[in-house]
Structure formats: structure tokens, C-alpha cells
Image: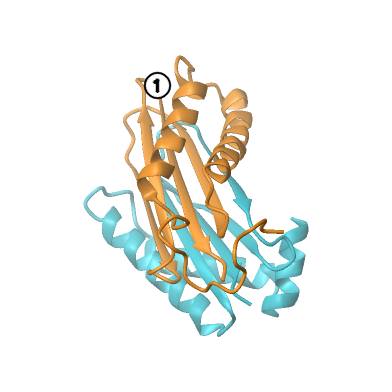
């Protein structure tokens, strides 16, 4: 299932470790590609948020974090000057697990993406 | 939500139970409050702390990720979506949408098996 990686490793080596900077770049690329020039429209955004989540997940997987389970959360909202606060707490293995995030804001919408990477031993 | 029923078996509680607990946590922390940008940090921290500690009390072989978004009601639209690469038999998630007169709150719980 994993190709050539050693299935008895319980800690990722440096190569395999979830790299937030790399993942953040993946998120940025996909979001800019899909949302540049898009105006907030309820129906369109409903679909867009789902496809964006799937695309980002696929893109991050391609970046090679083979031993990681990924959870991608995309929130797209209409920009009307309202306050929005998003936070997260995780109960996991801080040595191996991590996350990356990015925020994209235009004058009529905002998009927050978080990707969590959880190592499976 | 077929992965959620596998999760139910694994965690031995119903999704309804978790949803009920999440709603109770939200009612207890922000139920009577009006959106206040100076309090929002404190509220989300309290919500997340309670959620994580309730989940850990279950004593199951899972890692948990909990996210919480609080937004002021202004008539603006909001959509959230998740996509996961995980073990479809053992892992699962649960999302609760909650609101009062002045704000919306979306809490998502992701449970990742380490079995």
C-alpha cells in the first residue's frame, strides 16, 4: 500500500515530515487559481468550497506526505465587514503532527483554509 | 456519512450524543452572549478546551482535531467544506452549526484513529 517506505517506522524521517511551509504553498496556489476574480455568490460558493477542499487535499497528497492522514477545512464567506474568529485545538502527537493555513481576502469574499497532517504509525 | 457509522462502532457512542454534547458546550459558553469582538478569543478558547477535554475523557485510541468558527450575523453568507484523506473504516468527523441572535458558530470535530 505504501510503496517502498518502511512500515515499521514510528517516527517520520526528515524527508517525510509534514512541512507547513510546503503545504501552505500548495494551499496558496490552489486558492489563487480558483478564487481570483470570483465574486461571492451563494450557490457557486457552496460548490466551490467543496471542490476547493478536494483539490487542496489532492495537491497536498501529491506533494508527498505519504505517512500522513490529511484533514482539509475550507471556509469561504462573504466579506461585509463582519467579525469572524476561527480557532482550533488538537489532541495529537506534537512531534509528528502539524498544520498549515492560509487566508485569501478580496473586497467581497474571504477564504480560510487549514490543512492538518496527522502521522499514522 | 458512512464513515461516521464506522466511527460510532469504534467509539461506542452515537453521533447524536456527540452533537448533543457539542451543543451543550456552546449553549453554556456563548448561549446568552451577544457578539463582542473583545470576547471572541476567550469564547473560542473556552469552547475548544471543553470540547477537547470531553473527547479525551472518552479514553479512545484517537487523535482529535477540533475547529471552531464564530461569526457575527450581518446577513453575509458563509460556507464551510472539509475533505479528508484518512482511514474510511475507523476515522470520522462531526460538525455542529449553532446560532443565537447575534452570531453563528460552527464547530467541527475530526477523530483520527491511532489503532
Question: Is B44 situated left or right of B77 in this image?
Answer: left
Residue B23, image x and y in percent? Answer: 53, 65
Image colour assigned to chain A: orange
Q: Residue at x 32, y 48 (%)?
A: B35
Q: Residue furthest left?
A: B38
Residue B107, image x and y in percent? Answer: 50, 56
Q: Output the chain of dot 1.
A: A
Q: Residue at x 47, y 65 (%)?
A: A12
Q: Secondary structure at mark 1?
A: loop
Residue B115, image x and y in percent? Answer: 64, 77
Q: Residue at x 40, y 43 (%)?
A: A22
| Quadrant where the N terminus of chain B is found in the figure | bottom right
Q: Residue at x 72, y 60 (%)?
A: B88
Image colour assigned to chain B: cyan
Residue B102 visible (yes or no): no
Q: In this figure, what is the number of numbered marks?
A: 1
Asked whether A1 or A61 is in front, the reply is A1
Task: Estimate how packed mark 1 is, as few (under 14), some (14 to 19) or many (20 or more) residues with alpha carbons within 10 Å.
Answer: some
Residue identified by numbered label 1:
A108
Work out whether A49 lies above or below B7: above
Amino acid at each position: 500500500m505504501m510503496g517502498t517506505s518502511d512500515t515499521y517506522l514510528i517516527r517520520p524521517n526528515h524527508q517525510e515530515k509534514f512541512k507547513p511551509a510546503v503545504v501552505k504553498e500548495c494551499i496558496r496556489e490552489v486558492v489563487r487559481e480558483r478564487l481570483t476574480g470570483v465574486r461571492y455568490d451563494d450557490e457557486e460558493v457552496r460548490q466551490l468550497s467543496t471542490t476547493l477542499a478536494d483539490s487542496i487535499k489532492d495537491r497536498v497528497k501529491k506533494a508527498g506526505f505519504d505517512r500522513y492522514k490529511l484533514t482539509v477545512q475550507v471556509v469561504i464567506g462573504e466579506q461585509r465587514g463582519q467579525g469572524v474568529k476561527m480557532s482550533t485545538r488538537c489532541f495529537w502527537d506534537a512531534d509528528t503532527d502539524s498544520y498549515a493555513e492560509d487566508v485569501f481576502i478580496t473586497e467581497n469574499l474571504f477564504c480560510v483554509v487549514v490543512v492538518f497532517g496527522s502521522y499514522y504509525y | 456519512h458512512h464513515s461516521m457509522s464506522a466511527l460510532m462502532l469504534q467509539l461506542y457512542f452515537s453521533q447524536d450524543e456527540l452533537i448533543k454534547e457539542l451543543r451543550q458546550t456552546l449553549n453554556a459558553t456563548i448561549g446568552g452572549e451577544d457578539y463582542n469582538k473583545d470576547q471572541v478569543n476567550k469564547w473560542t478558547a473556552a469552547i475548544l478546551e471543553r470540547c477537547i477535554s470531553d473527547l479525551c475523557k472518552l479514553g479512545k485510541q484517537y487523535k482529535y482535531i477540533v475547529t471552531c468558527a464564530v461569526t457575527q450575523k450581518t446577513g453575509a453568507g458563509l460556507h464551510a467544506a472539509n475533505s479528508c484523506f484518512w482511514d474510511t473504516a475507523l476515522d470520522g468527523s462531526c460538525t455542529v452549526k449553532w446560532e443565537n441572535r447575534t452570531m453563528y458558530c460552527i464547530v467541527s470535530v475530526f477523530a483520527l484513529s491511532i489503532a
